[in-house]
Image (tube, rainbow, N blue to C red):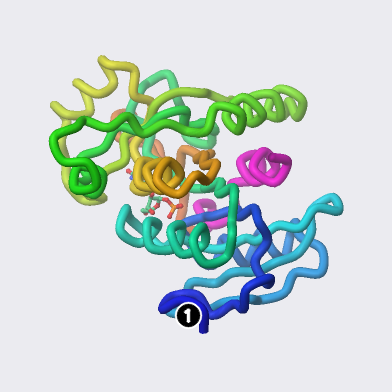
Amino acid sequence: MPTPHIRAERGQIADRVIMPGDPRRAERIATDYLEDAELVTDVRGILGFTGTWEGRRVTAMASGMGAPSITIYATELAREYGVRQIVRVGTCGGMSTDVAVRDVIIATGAHTDSTMTASRIPGVQFSHLADFSLARAAVEQAERMGGDAAIHAGAVFTSDHFYLDRPALTEALTAHGTLAVEMEAAALYAVGAAEKVRTLAVVTVSDHLVTGESMTADERETQFDAAARIALAL
Ligand SMILES: O=P(O)(O)O[C@H]1O[C@H](CO)[C@@H](O)[C@H]1O
Ligand SMILES: O=c1cc[nH]c(=O)[nH]1
């Protein structure tokens, strides 16, 4: 097995990867969108499938939840499998009242309370940025697609916490333009910078910290069509 966490042989993973947090969403992307999808890894239940989308080879593989988990998978994909592009397709909690449940956010940057980047470059407040050409292409693709989902481009907050109520932090971050909270984008962007991989997160708002609006667990698994179609087109 080439890595401790990925069972695929070299060559079984495409050079571009669509990466949801949830393994069942990876499976759904493979089933609903990819042609000739083949399961290439299932270590620890983190499923990865390789197939084609509109004639181009692509792998849909889960990241698990949180900065450490996506850092492991993204690093191994870059170093051991030659992956050059990773697009996270995730869910997030709306923070700004400019966004609503079911909206899609193209995360051009990610603030974080995770210490993972701080320990890469001690003493520096690193800027976690999406690859510019990918972000631009994602916005253009969203404009071409049209459709019902409102699309936003801007900063998200990558948190180590799912269950920690911090209304003052939410208020301060939204006052500084932050749209939503999720748990992986900043770590993915740090791997992108370190490993010279193009990275982007396209996240669907599944619940809202301020309005209290929320999707059901089933909707969280299924309501990501716009984000998936944007990511697959890149
Ligand atoms: O739906 P995914 O992609 O897992 O993303 C969000 O959902 C998880 C928390 O429920 C975290 O991973 C967060 O980033
Ligand atoms: O990380 C996440 C994802 C969805 N909703 C949240 O509040 N946080």
Left or right side of 183 for 116: left
Question: Considering only vertical position in the picture, is 189 above or below 4?
Answer: above
Majority secondary structure in the magenta region: helix
Q: What is the span of residues highlighted in magenta in the rendered image?
A: 218-234
| Horizontal and vertical percent position of residue 124 | 19, 32
Left or right side of 209 for 228: right
Structural crowding at the residue carrying mark 1, measured as other residues with C-alpha within 10 Å and reported as few (<14), some (14–19) or many (≥20):
few
Question: Considering only vertical position in the picture, is 230 above or below 174?
Answer: below
Seen at 71% across and 29% down, the residue is 141
Looking at the rendered structure, the number of numbered marks drawn on it comes to 1
| Horizontal and vertical percent position of residue 213 | 39, 36
Seen at 60% across and 33% down, the residue is 134
Q: Nearer the viewer, residue 67 or 171?
A: 67
Question: Mark 1 = which residue?
Answer: 43
User: Is residue 230 in the magenta section?
Assistant: yes
Question: Considering only vertical position in the picture, is 2 above or below 122?
Answer: below
Q: Residue furthest bottom?
A: 1
Q: Quadrant of residue 192?
A: top left
| Horizontal and vertical percent position of residue 17 | 61, 55
* Quadrant (top left/top right/bottom left/bottom right) for the C terminus: top right
Q: Secondary structure at mark 1?
A: helix
Left or right side of 80 for 213: left
User: Is residue 223 in the magenta section?
Assistant: yes
The disc labelled 1 sits on which kind of residue? Val
Question: Considering only vertical position in the picture, is 107 above or below 41?
Answer: above
Q: Residue furthest right?
A: 55
Seen at 52% across and 55% down, the residue is 20
| Horizontal and vertical percent position of residue 107 | 47, 32
Q: Quadrant of residue 148?
A: top right
Left or right side of 234 for 127: left
Tell me if the residue at label 1 has its CB under 8 Å from ligand 1.
no
Q: Nearer the viewer, residue 77 or 152?
A: 77
